[in-house]
Image: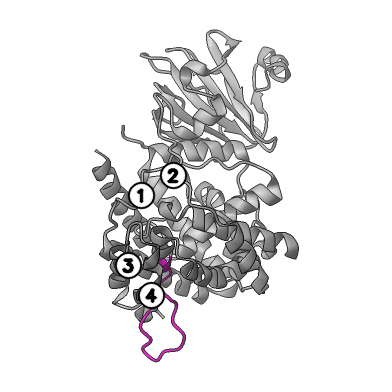
Amino acid sequence: MTIRHHVSDTLLMAYSAGQLPEAFNLVVATHLSLCDDCRARLGAFDAVGGAVLADCGAATMPESSLEATLARLNNPVAAKKTQQRGDLPAPLLDYIGGGLDAVKWRPLGLGVRQAILSTDRAASARLLYIPAGHAVPDHGHRGTELTLVLQGAFRDATDRFAKGDLEIADEDLQHTPVAEQGPACICLAATDAPLRFLGLIPRLAQPFFRI
Amino acid sequence: MIETLAPEKPDAWSAARAYVAPGTGAGRRRERPVVTGRNEGNGPVDPDWAAMLALVRDRQDKAAFAALFRHFAPRVKGFLMKSGASEALAEECAQDVMATLWQKAHLFDPERASVATWVFTIARNRRIDALRKSRRPEPEDLPWGPEAEPDQQAALEMQQDTARLGVALAQLPEKQRALIERAYFGDLSHSEIAAETGLPLGTIKSRIRLALERLRHQMT
């Protein structure tokens, strides 16, 4: 798997600083699970956080706080293994409650399906299932939309996106992602604002489907 | 400050490792490996925190933990207060962060992070829990444990590069440094964050990349 589309510096630094909505965190963490380049870049941003913490000035801790902490230390716990189980990276498994076969898909029409994942309300996350050759309706965005390919591939006016690739779409991008021939394209998508569909019918359907 | 990161650090790390005396509680009473950097007369020197953490990991050494606590807990508290936590909450969270450091010492990888960096990641996650009551999914764990021997030279270079990064941060123009600090204190929304820091992040990134490659190689 060669990943060509990566997390931007801005998103990585915001993830490192802990300033992303949960749905964006999920997309970034899933991409990082597939991409050691971005994992290393995140490590560099975390090092900036370490330098800030080391240098930001110490506050006084009472000596009793050390005793209190020592008193509650237990035997170290064994590492919790969150190894990849089957077909999806570990961060997603928690949200789905299993692998791809555990996803509760709902039809969106024309063979396209989605499953909304539960996150805090600053942004929303969902899985999209796009059969080969099908398109997600033409849409723009009010905010930022992140789309990470988990299986298959799609193309839009900007480029081709295959497994592990992340598309970062802002307000300026109107696009119609089309799934390539082959296995259905499955994506993890997150937005910090509702999508804006151009056609009348999808717009009416939008509140109903929560996309 | 950089040259005071003593050349004997790798020895301290290996001493800490060689020191594991399985099943002997008496181990704690034996001579300690040297865990302070060499002082070249240039003022105070940071102890070798990575070696201290190795003592915590390998021997549940409470003296080493106390030293780490005295250094890092006040900084975590300061960091959390600058992030908007009340003093009481910041103090409570600083204790939680240090307890987590004890619990998860086996996950620390000196080839990929300095102790300060690692403490920061724990403090950040605690802040998200406490202040935003939100979840932060983490990337998939890479297998890491005491049985995997870190490359001492790589670990030393990582610690040195991180020290250089701290110096570079301190030397940035005030305005630029304040912007970076505000980002990490959680003062800026993700759309306000400017990732162009002017800091030398390339070498650190390359080192972590190499460490990940070594790790992946061990896994296969």
Pointer 1 and pointer 3: residues touching (CB < 8 Å)?
no
Residue B172 shows in the view: yes
Magenta region: B37-52
Point 57% across, 20% down: residue: A138
For the N terminus of chain B, give its image quadrant: bottom left
| Badge 1 and badge 2 both on one subunit | no
Q: Chain of mark 1?
A: B
Q: Chain of mark 2?
A: A
Does A12 sit above or below residue B200?
Answer: above
Helix, strand or loop at label 4? It is loop
Kind of residue at badge 1: Gly
Measured in 3D between alpha carbons, the distance from the residue under mark 1 to the one under mark 2, in whole angstroms, is 8 Å
Residue located beneath label 4 in the image:
B35
Q: Is residue A147 covered in magenta?
A: no
Residue B63: percent from the left, percent from the top? Answer: 48, 71
Kind of residue at badge 3: Trp
Residue located beneath label 3 in the image:
B13
Pointer 3 and pointer 4: residues touching (CB < 8 Å)?
no
Measured in 3D between alpha carbons, the distance from the residue under mark 3 to the one under mark 4, in whole angstroms, is 8 Å
Residue located beneath label 1 in the image:
B145
